[in-house]
Image (spheres, grey):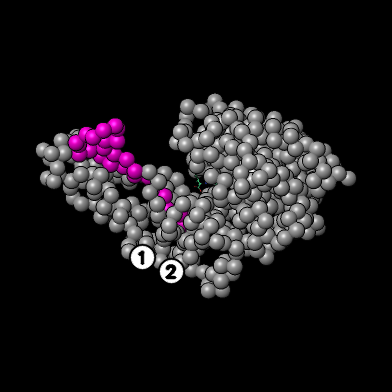
Amino acid sequence: MKSAKNYIEENKERFLNELIDLLKIPSISADSAYKKDVIATAEAVKTSLEKAGCDVVEICETPGYPIVYGEKIIDKNLPTVLVYGHYDVQPPDPLDLWESPPFEPVIKKTDTHPEGAIYARGSCDDKGQMYMHVKAMEYMTQTNQLPCNVKFMIEGEEEVGSVSLGWFLERNREKLSNDVILISDTGMIAKDVPSITTGLRGLSYVEVEVTGPNRDLHSGLYGGAVANPINVLAKMIASLHDENNHITIPGFYDKVEELTTKEREKMAEAPFSLDAYKKALDINDVYGEKGYTTNERNSIRPTLDVNGIWGGYTGEGAKTVIASKAYAKISMRLVPDQDWKEITDLFKNHFESIAPKAVKVKVTPHHGGTAYVTPIDSLEYRAAEKAYEATFGKTPIPQRSGGSIPIVALFEKELKSKTILMGFGLDSDAIHSPNEHFGIWNYLKGIETIPQFFHYFTEMKK
Ligand code: BES
Ligand code: MN
Ligand code: MN
């Protein structure tokens, strides 16, 4: 029987070229100008699942972008793995910072990726990682080694908050029934340090609008006498953290899960170099909540960050003006057991309460999601551990991530199954950023490791 390693070696070029073709379609879910491309990508994913050996593949319409569903049921008595991924991507801006166009994939060698990496928007998040599962499926069906049933659910709205997914889950509980959910949409510590993501943060995303005078004003005639909404917004935002970088919203930390000293010690064992971290980002120092390490700050602690802020004159040269309005987009990353709707309300009430009488404030919630943590003694986790041991020769390190995939908590609630997050991206792969890339080594290692999970999970379920 052919090993995955051999199969991958023989088909490597094709595996790369197929992914490159998929990356050429600009499936930007946030921008309605790309609607046709998002839909074309769903079609391309459908075709790829058919070719990989699914017996049934459907494009399922939702109130938003379609969900591609595929399945191969070999025996109703065998376990079922549900693979989730997303075919939509983040907007590529700022375009001028890309070394090559975001939707014209190129392969470049780097120090981290001496075998080469594919540069394109979505290469790592998540087309490349999603496509590893399609190719792993192809390998298992082509070599008669699919050990259990498999279902695919690939959505097109993850980057805009998976707005239609709840709707779809409610209506397709039976269709989506499974024994475990498998997702590759996270990262790993390093190529020689395999890790399994055991936690994701939740999210509350809001937009704020501060209005001062009813029109833009001459900053000489009115400056100093009326509230400048940009000054006021800056001051309000600055007040959301205290001198220790704790968030000042009353009640914000009430439900935050505090880890035990033992748990924190265990976390600190994961290899991490603060110097390398600072060097990679060109910063002289890190910055964050007092009393916590960098890895704690970006995984087990909640945060509040401005993602964008605008207003007034930003064109060439100088214009003396007091703008009528100022805006900001703010995200709060949440941890167990914070409730994102509750946090959104706390934010709204607090933000409105700190506004001076001289301005009007509007808070508009966007989307949110619940944090997720998974145990490391479950059958599902142990099967994943064995899969990594088989292909990396090392036991993977459990690691809580700071990112969010809000549907994971929803899956557990609605479908009552555990999720295994087998990510193969690196933090340096620049997801959501210019020059996003995905290492060819990582891509192929993922394709090799996934069938091992299917194997061990099926064996251990028996
Ligand atoms: N794949 C990412 C999430 C991720 C990346 C988790 C790396 C862990 C490690 C996902 O596509 C994403 O970007 N999620 C968004 C949230 C979503 C609601 C827009 C995020 O984390 O900002
Ligand atoms: Mn993703
Ligand atoms: Mn993303």
Q: Quadrant of the N terminus?
A: top right
Q: Position of residue 119 (x, y in %)?
A: 59, 37
Q: Nearer the viewer, residue 150 or 264?
A: 264
Residue located beneath label 2 in the image: 291
Q: Are marks 2 and 1 in contact (CB under 8 Å)?
A: yes
Q: Position of residue 244 (x, y in %)?
A: 36, 65
Q: Residue furthest right?
A: 1
In the rendering, which numbered label is found on residue 156? none
Per the image, label 2 sits on a secondary structure element best described as loop
Q: Nearer the viewer, residue 78 or 445?
A: 445
The answer to whether residue 180 of the structure is visible from this angle is: yes
Per the image, label 1 sits on a secondary structure element best described as loop
Q: Is residue 204 left or right of residue 259?
A: left
Amino acid, disc 2:
Gly
Q: Position of residue 16 (x, y in %)?
A: 69, 35
- The image shows residue 419, relative to residue 432, as above or below, that is below
Q: Is residue 412 left or right of residue 347?
A: right
Q: Is residue 312 left or right of residue 206?
A: left
Q: Nearer the viewer, residue 163 or 46?
A: 46
Q: Residue at x 23, y 35 (%)?
A: 318
What segment is highlighted magenta in the picture? Answer: 309-338
Ligand 1 within 8 Å, label 1 CB: no
Q: Residue at x 56, y 50 (%)?
A: 427
The answer to whether residue 49 of the structure is visible from this angle is: no
Q: Is residue 229 magenta?
A: no
- The image shows residue 391, relative to residue 254, as above or below, that is above
Q: Quadrant of the C terminus?
A: bottom right
Residue located beneath label 1 in the image: 244
Q: Nearer the viewer, residue 199 or 96?
A: 96
Q: Is residue 334 magenta?
A: yes
Amino acid, disc 1:
Asn
